[in-house]
């Protein structure tokens, strides 16, 4: 039995027309959880590393991700 909190098979991909509160990257390497304030929590694929990102920095991070693809 896995001790992971989220089953990535049941999370929508990050490239969706409407932002989700919980999404996963298309390669299943990152899980992103957004709260009602727009702040993000990045979760590693093994779900052991959690990185909080405030909403202002999250916009820059999202832009960086989009430009790198």
Image (cartoon, helix red, strand yellow):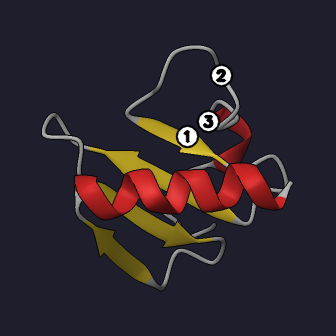
Q: Residue at x 32, y 55 (%)?
A: 40
Disc on res. 49 = none
Q: In x, y percent, where is residue 41?
A: 35, 62
Left or right? Give the position of 38 relative to 42: left
Left or right? Give the position of 11 relative to 69: left
Tell me, yes or no, if residue 3 can be seen here.
no
Left or right? Give the position of 51 relative to 31: left
Q: Earlier in the sequence, mark 1 or mark 3?
A: 3
Circle 2 crowding by C-alpha within 10 Å: few under 14, some 14–19, many from 20 = few
Residue at mark 3: 11
Left or right? Give the position of 5 relative to 7: left
Circles 2, 1 touching at the beta carbon (< 8 Å) = yes
| Residue closest to the far bottom | 49
Residue at mark 1: 23
Circle 3 crowding by C-alpha within 10 Å: few under 14, some 14–19, many from 20 = some
Numbered disc in front, either 3 or 2: 2
| Residue closest to the far top | 17
Residue at mark 2: 16
Circles 1, 3 touching at the beta carbon (< 8 Å) = yes
Q: Residue at x 63, y 62 (%)?
A: 64
Q: Residue at x 63, y 63 (%)?
A: 30
Numbered disc in front, either 2 or 1: 2
Tell me, yes or no, if residue 48 can be seen here.
yes
| 3D distance between C-alphas at marks 3 and 2 | 11 Å
Q: Secondary structure at mark 2?
A: loop
* Image: 24 above or below 45: above
């Amino acid at each position: 039995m896995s001790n992971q909190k989220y089953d990535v098979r049941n999370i929508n991909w990050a490239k969706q027309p409407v932002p989700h509160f919980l999404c996963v990257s298309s390669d299943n390497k990152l899980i992103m959880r957004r709260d009602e304030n727009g702040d993000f929590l990045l979760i590693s694929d093994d779900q052991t590393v959690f990185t909080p990102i405030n909403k202002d920095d999250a916009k820059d991070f999202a832009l960086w991700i989009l430009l790198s693809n």
